[in-house]
């Protein structure tokens, strides 16, 4: 009787076993639908060779022979896809065909395989791939991955992927669809919005209502993130304005010189960075990662020396005549621009970025570029360093004394011409340092400084002439307000609006946000 029952079971099971699709045979088939089914079947089979085969198919290295055998090309050799054993090459081998649907199936299948990877980054990427593919065949792998996952972030990504698969799978119950919507809502990005909007035609009113609530919540979150992103862009722009204006705040505040060549000091710093990088590329390529650090003191010295020369040979004859300093320094700016154009040519020059300033990272939904972040840190470091020099050194004490009352400072034995020259050199040197940072986010050309000179004067006047804290507050305020206004009125109207605001503000407070105190200032 036992033998009879066993025989009967085998007879009943034989048709089902005979009909079980062979993924290798499907991959060797002629139709795209059959190949796509083979990709999904291979991923679900648990075959240890699955990842290598799918990788070969993705790269066009999976070959099929006249006898429907599958082989993988590895360099100049050919191996059997099932076993990895060497095989004979033949001109009759043809690559397995793949269209967009097959490629999407490959991406989803490789995602399923990576769900069990010991590498957490691969598991996270696999969860994102399954979320985008929404292949119902990935459900068993997702459930198994969720059961063993211990990292909260990856568990969340797996939960979101499972919810996306359930919402895309035909026949999912109403309760399961409603339960999956909060996980999609928690993701809160454009992909999640697209999935929930796809439920607008769902036959269940409860599902449509839950999807509508999720869409409203995501729209609110995206609006808040958009505003915060603009604030970040504004802080980034403010840091650039701070770097460009902080040197001008010193020279304008101490000597009352309207230095229209200040932008060219920025330009000299950028070209110094270019020159240092070219020298490193040819003489010591291994030091390229340190090129910006090496460029900072070089740019400071080049621009600072040029500032001292301008002060000694031109500016010192024009003290007390601000309009004439404006005209004279404007002429100097044209000379410097033409000199750089003659030496380096009129075209833009490429300045490379070190590895630590490349790329971006996500911070609670905000896209933060490493380059901008380091420029903000650099701008604050320059500000604090300058503040230390002016507050804690003998030179800073003399500079502040000359700023507040030049005649009294001279009567006390301070060599005001010496302070003027060094202060002008310090302001120009800081502008050169600003050029190092700006070379990473702007075109290095002879006209580089012209784009920042007007904004620099606006920052200095708005913050208070000669006041560093006022310069910091003004730069960040103008940067943030400008970026918040741009989405609504456009970049040009935003700048015009800021200019009108500053004109009206100066009418009310001629000395800016933070006015300097002193007898000479108040007289």
Image: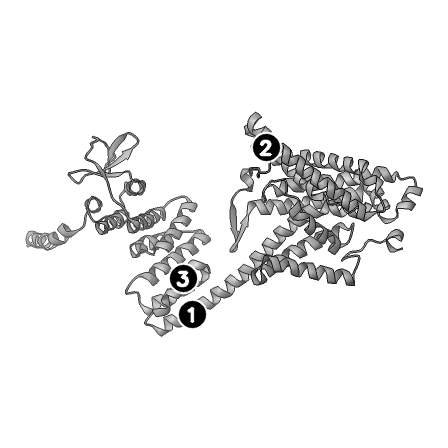
Q: In the image, which is nearer the foreground, mark 2 or mark 3?
A: 2
Q: Is residue 483 left or right of residue 427?
A: left
Q: Quarter-wise, where is residue 139 in the image?
A: bottom left
Location of residue 434 with respect to 205 vertically, above or below: above
**Residue 245 seen in the figure:** yes
Q: Residue, x 72% and y 59% (percent of image)?
A: 502
Mark 2 element type: helix
Mark 1 element type: helix
Q: Which mark is first along the chain, 3 or 1?
A: 3
The residue carrying mark 3 is 194
The residue carrying mark 1 is 212
x, y (%) of residue 370?
A: 56, 45
Say few, some or many: other residues with alpha carbon within 10 Å of mark 3 (under 14 / 14 to 19 / 20 or more): few
Q: Are marks 2 and 3 in contact (CB under 8 Å)?
A: no
x, y (%) of residue 214?
A: 44, 67
Q: Quadrant location of the C terminus?
A: bottom right
Q: Is residue 62 left or right of residue 337?
A: left
Q: Which mark is residue 327?
A: none
Say few, some or many: other residues with alpha carbon within 10 Å of mark 1 (under 14 / 14 to 19 / 20 or more): some
Q: In the image, which is nearer the foreground, mark 1 or mark 3?
A: 3
Q: Quadrant location of the N terminus?
A: bottom left
The residue carrying mark 2 is 277
Location of residue 282 with respect to 393 vertically, above or below: above
Mark 3 element type: helix
């Amino acid at each position: 009787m036992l033998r009879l029952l066993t025989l009967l079971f085998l007879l009943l099971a034989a048709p089902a076993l005979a009909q079980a699709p062979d993924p290798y045979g499907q991959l060797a088939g002629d139709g795209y639908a059959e190949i796509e089914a083979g990709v999904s079947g291979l991923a679900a089979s648990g075959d240890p060779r699955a990842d290598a085969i799918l990788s070969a198919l993705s790269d066009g290295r999976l070959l099929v022979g006249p006898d429907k055998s599958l082989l993988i090309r590895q360099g100049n050799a050919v191996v059997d896809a099932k076993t990895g054993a060497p095989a004979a090459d033949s001109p009759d081998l043809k690559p397995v065909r793949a269209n967009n649907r097959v490629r999407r199936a490959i991406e989803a299948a490789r995602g399923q395989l990576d769900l069990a990877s010991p590498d957490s980054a691969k598991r996270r990427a696999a969860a994102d791939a399954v979320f985008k593919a929404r292949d119902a065949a990935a459900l068993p792998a997702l459930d198994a991955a969720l059961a063993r996952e211990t990292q909260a972030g990856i568990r969340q990504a797996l939960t979101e992927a499972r919810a996306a698969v359930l919402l895309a799978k035909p026949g999912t119950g109403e309760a399961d669809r409603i339960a999956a919507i909060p996980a999609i809502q928690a993701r809160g990005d454009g992909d999640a919005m697209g999935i929930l909007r796809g439920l607008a035609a769902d036959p269940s009113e409860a599902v449509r209502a839950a999807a509508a609530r999720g869409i409203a919540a995501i729209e609110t979150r995206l609006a808040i993130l958009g505003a915060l992103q603009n604030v970040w862009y504004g802080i980034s722009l403010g840091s650039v304005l701070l770097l460009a204006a902080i040197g001008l705040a010193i020279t304008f505040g101490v000597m009352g010189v309207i230095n229209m060549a200040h932008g060219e000091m920025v330009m000299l710093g950028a070209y110094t960075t270019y020159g240092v990088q070219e020298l490193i590329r040819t003489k010591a390529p291994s030091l390229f990662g340190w090129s910006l650090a090496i460029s900072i003191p070089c740019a400071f010295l080049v621009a600072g020396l040029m500032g001292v020369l301008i002060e000694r040979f031109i500016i010192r004859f024009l003290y007390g005549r601000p309009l004439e300093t404006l005209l004279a320094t404007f002429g100097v700016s044209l000379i410097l621009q033409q000199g750089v154009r003659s030496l380096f040519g009129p075209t833009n020059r490429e300045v490379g970025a070190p590895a630590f300033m490349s790329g971006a990272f996500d911070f609670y939904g905000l896209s933060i570029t490493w380059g901008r972040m380091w420029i903000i840190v650099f701008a604050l470091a320059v500000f604090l360093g300058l503040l230390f020099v002016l507050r804690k050194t003998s030179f800073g004490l003399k500079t502040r004394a000359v700023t507040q009352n030049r005649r009294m400072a001279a009567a006390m034995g301070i060599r005001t011409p010496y302070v003027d020259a060094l202060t002008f050199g310090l302001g120009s040197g800081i502008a050169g340092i600003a050029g190092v940072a700006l070379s990473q986010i702007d075109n290095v050309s002879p006209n580089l400084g012209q784009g920042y000179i007007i904004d620099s004067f606006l920052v200095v006047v708005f913050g208070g002439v000669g006041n560093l804290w006022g310069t910091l507050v003004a730069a960040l305020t103008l940067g943030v307000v400008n970026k918040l206004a741009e989405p609504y009125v456009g970049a040009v109207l935003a700048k015009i609006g800021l200019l009108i605001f500053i004109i009206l503000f100066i009418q009310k407070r001629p000395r800016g946000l933070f006015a300097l105190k002193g007898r000479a200032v108040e007289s």
